[in-house]
Image (tube, grey):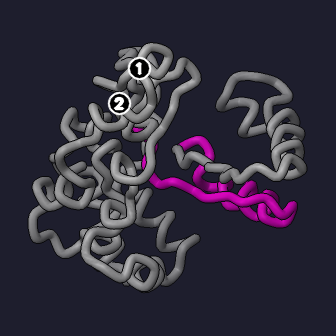
Amino acid sequence: DTCDRIVRSPGAFAKFKKAAALLEGSGLRYLIKLVTMKDNYQEVMVSFRLIRRLGWKCSIPFSFVPRRDKNPLRNAQISSQQLDPKELAAFIKKYHPGYLRKRLDSCGQQGGDAASCNAGTIACTITATGRLAMCQYVLEGAPDLLRTPFIKAWRSFRPKKTPLQKQRKACGSCRHTQYCCWCPGRAYLTVGSQEKKIPRLCQAMEMVSSQS
């Protein structure tokens, strides 16, 4: 019911389960992402456990970001659904016990998500319309593969800085970078720059750290 209400389409969750089953049988690699927002964060773990019981791969991104097209109406709705720092910290504490330790163990280096991000280095995104982008969050300047050969497009668009270098510019020596889920794309959509902090995320990580 929550899924159908959020996407405003009756039967949407049933269609999702059917599509996921088809993906599972196709042999393709995939990852289902459950977006966390005010309308679902109290019960999102129910969906997560159901999906995992069915044997499907699933993750829960903590960041609900504005739209790329900057639609003011849609972005106002997104803003109203974003978890505030206190809610986000409480969610992590309740459903991800040992979050900091696990993040530190999995990252194993300074930089958190930015350190492990391959966007624009050995990975990219190709949109449904044939544009080659660093990631799904940043399409500005993305070459058109319908007009430009892939190799030429790849060489022309690769960023001069890695995600980790951008994080160092944005966050400096912040003590939370090793486990924070900051990334250039989320920063770009949230604050308009790939090299700036995301204040809401900074506050949440401070709370998570103090609670651990």
Q: Position of residue 139 (x, y in %)?
A: 36, 27
Q: Are marks 2 and 1 in contact (CB under 8 Å)?
A: yes
Give the class, few, some or many, for how many residues have Cα within 10 Å of label 1's Cα (few <14, many ≥20): few
Which of the labelled discs sits on residue 152, or is there none? 2
Type of the residue with mark 2: Lys
Percent position of residue 91, x then y: 50, 63
Residue 196 versus residue 145: which sits nearer the camera?
Answer: 145
Res 172 seen here:
yes
Q: What's the residue type where badge 1 is placed? A: Thr
Specify whether 184 is left or right of 73.
Answer: left
Question: Compared to 141, does 120 lie above or below?
Answer: below
Describe the element under mark 1 as helix, strand or loop: loop
Marks 2 and 1, how far apart at CA: 7 Å
| Image quarter of the N terminus | top right
Residue 138 is inside the magenta segment: no
The residue range painted magenta reads 38-65
Give the residue drawn at x 31%, y 66%: 115
